[in-house]
């Protein structure tokens, strides 16, 4: 089988392709065509799920044998609501904020499962946990500073001289 002969370079190539695809899969829902028809998030997730199912047969071309496991059903039970929530997040918070935040949190959740549940080995547990802490601080900073000022806050500050510095004085 193809994957039996793979070394770590195959893993890195697959990870790079995965990042490229996961980083881009939300782009079509921000296009004018998708916005004009206002597709429901559950319908959009259904399209993604159908194409995931159809393209999953590509592994058969790599020599893998088909097999069934109930854990695939469990995985799907997590994936579908997560996908719907992600579509809603992109529509409401925007592509950059939602995709960046979700991807970072996915790394944290996957790291937690791997380290604490499956007891996967890392070079330094304390350094890896510190790196996760730094990532969480970065996510918070990215989310806070990427979010636009809510319009209600801007309009409520008009005419009030204490709302946010010199530019707000005098009923801007």
Image (cartoon, rainbow, N blue to C red):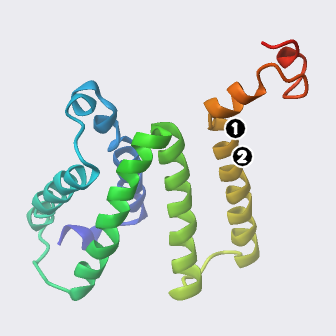
Residue occupied by mark 2: 141
Quadrant in which the N terminus is drawn = bottom left
Q: Secondary structure at mark 2?
A: helix
Q: Residue at x 32, y 57 (%)?
A: 84
Nearest to the observer: residue 12 or residue 17: 17
On residue 79, the disc is none
Image quarter in which the C terminus is found:
top right
**Residue 167 as seen in the image, left or right of residue 79:** right
Point 10% across, 59% down: residue: 54
How crowded pointer 2 is (Cα within 10 Å; few <14, some 14-19, many 20+) is rated as few
Q: Is residue 119 among the parts visible in the rendering?
A: no
In depth, the one of 69 and 97 nearer the eye is 97
The vertical placement of 124 against 84, above or below, is below
Q: Secondary structure at mark 1?
A: helix
How far apart are labels 1 and 2 at the CA level? 6 Å
- Contact between labelled residues 2 and 1, with CB atoms less than 8 Å apart: yes
């Amino acid at each position: 089988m193809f994957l039996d002969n793979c070394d770590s370079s195959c893993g890195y190539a697959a990870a790079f392709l995965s990042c490229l695809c996961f980083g881009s899969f939300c782009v079509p829902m921000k296009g004018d065509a998708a916005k004009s028809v206002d597709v429901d998030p559950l319908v959009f997730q259904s399209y993604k799920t159908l194409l995931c199912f159809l393209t999953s047969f590509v592994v058969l071309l790599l020599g893998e044998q088909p097999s069934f496991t109930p854990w695939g059903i469990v995985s799907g039970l997590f994936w579908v609501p997560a996908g719907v929530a992600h579509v809603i997040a992109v529509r409401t918070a925007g592509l950059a904020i939602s995709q960046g935040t979700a991807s970072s949190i996915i790394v944290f959740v996957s790291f937690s499962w791997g380290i604490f549940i499956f007891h996967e080995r890392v070079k330094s547990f304390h350094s890896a946990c510190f790196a996760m802490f730094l990532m969480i601080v970065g996510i918070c900073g990215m989310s806070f500073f990427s979010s636009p000022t809510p319009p209600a806050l801007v309009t409520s500050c008009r005419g009030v001289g204490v709302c946010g510095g010199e530019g707000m004085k005098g009923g801007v």
